[in-house]
Image (cartoon, rainbow, N blue to C red):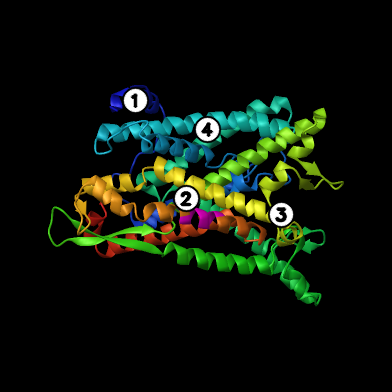
Amino acid sequence: MSSGRFSTLLRISQYVPEISSPSRKPALKIRLLWTLLILVIYLSMGFVPLYRVTVSAQVLPLYQIIFAAQQGTLTSLGIGPIVTGGLLAEILIGSDLIRLDFSKPEDRSAFTAMVKVFTLAFIVVESVAYTVGMLGFYYHVPASALPIDALQLILAGFVVYMLDQAIQKGWGVGSGVSLFILANVALIVMVDLFNPVKVAGEYFGLVPFLVQAALSGDVWRAVVRANGYPSLVGLGATVGFVLLLIYLEGIRIEVPVASSQYRGITGTYPIKLLYVSNVPVILVGALLANFQILTSWWASWARTSGAWYAAALAQYNAQGQLVGGLLYYLIGPQDLQQAIADPLLTVIFVVIMTLLSTAFAVVWVEMSGMSAEKAADSLVKAQVAIPGFRSTRSTVGMVLGRWIPTVTLLGGAIVGFIAGVSQFLGVFGGGIGLLLMVDIAIQYYQQLVQEELEFIMPRLAGIFGRR
């Protein structure tokens, strides 16, 4: 499809302010300083409440983790519009619903304009939906304040988009989306460890509580704590899962390849066990978060109107705790005690997480252009062949097809299972949050090592395609 079909998007994108790229690549220390400044601005926005909005607790923990959001603040939407707009554009391109040739500058410009317009559209749509649905319905914000809150969210969403663009354009390191998720989950982990706030007479953070328990002569209370509070079991599970994820990230199949154009140049094409990385759990988390909020609203309306199916959606005990219904199984066990007390809930939740993650892994590989056929097409276009096989799309695709479908299923199932189990083990930052944090931290480490190598050996920049 010609980029001329996107003339409307290109015209719209021209009126949207954007961050210009630096004329010359800044030094690594300068980019790190810009990255830190951008991060401080984003985190500071998370402490600025919306007009006449008071939030006592985060009611959407999955949304908070996946989109680095803080409910009731300027970052209530987090990076949601950016991620959603980018995913939609990639799905349209990867599924061949829209055909673009990224070797042509005009088609690359068309894709950039598409992502920009989609993101801005989602900023407006999600701001209005959040204001009407969450603020108006759940938090009971006065109707007179809702237009101001919607305007705040739209402006804040645009600021977040510009912050991400500043990093993407080369002023920072990595990407804004990854940086904000990493910082948000790391902040949650720090809160779980060191929060000095007392709840029901005991410290919430594990370290202050350990000191309190030691002084009282009852350290065993810190092993497993009620209400999902940070515990020694959670700390051990966190360390264990971090080591497991690092190990799994290193498992890969290395397919030998050689250049078809230059004799003697060989290498390997790595196919990781976690082929789709953390994308499946991001999609599962987003789906469950949306289902949770929609089911919660529906259940509240059903109870108020006395609908006969209200109990099927959500059941509450005398203390107002959720004890049954569809919403109960979508949220899953929140701590080890609940998981042991209700094994059926535990099994159902872990199975749901595993199956959905596996399904999303398969769909994402096909829709994002990561299938064996698309990978083979990329290798053939790059004039790279697999020794012993003909350098054709069908042959190379057949060879890659031996492993890619298998690692897609296994990788999706593994990350889904880990996310499900780690939730009720009390992993700091949440199961999905921990997966995201470890994966992003590894990516940042690899990028910083590469940056350091480029500084020591400038010629490597040409190999990596950068100057």
Q: Is 369 placed left or right of 355 in the picture?
A: left
Image check: 400 left or right of 415?
Answer: left
| Circle 3: residue type | Leu
**Residue at 35% of width from left, 34% of height from top?**
96
- Label 1 amino acid? Phe
In the image, which is nearer the foreground, mark 1 or mark 4? 1
Residue that badge 2 annotates: 178
Q: Check disc 4 and report the residue beneath it.
A: 123
Label 3 or label 2, whichever lies nearer to me, is 3
Label 1, label 3: how far apart the Cα atoms are: 51 Å
Please tell me in which quadrant of the rendered image residue 312 appears: top right
C-alpha separation, residue under disc 1 versus residue under disc 4 = 21 Å
Give the Cα distance between marks 1 and 2: 29 Å
Q: How many marks?
A: 4
Query: Which range is magenta?
Result: 410-416
Question: Is 152 left or right of 102, judged from the image as shown?
Answer: right
> Can you give x and y, in whole percent of width and height, for residue 140 in the image?
75, 32
277 versus 254 height, above or below: above
Q: Residue at x 50, y 35 (%)?
A: 158
Of mark 1 and mark 3, the one earlier in the sequence is 1
Whether residue 429 is visible to the viewer of this picture, yes or no, is no
Mark 1 and mark 3 in contact? Answer it, CB < 8 Å.
no
> Which is more toward the observer, 422 or 163?
422
Name the residue beneath numbered marker 1.
6
Residue 353, horizontal then vertical, whole percent? 59, 51
Q: Nearer the viewer, mark 1 or mark 2?
A: 1
Label 3 vs 2, first from the N-terminus: 2
Q: Mark 4 belongs to which amino acid?
A: Ile
Q: Give the Cα distance between marks 4 and 2.
A: 18 Å
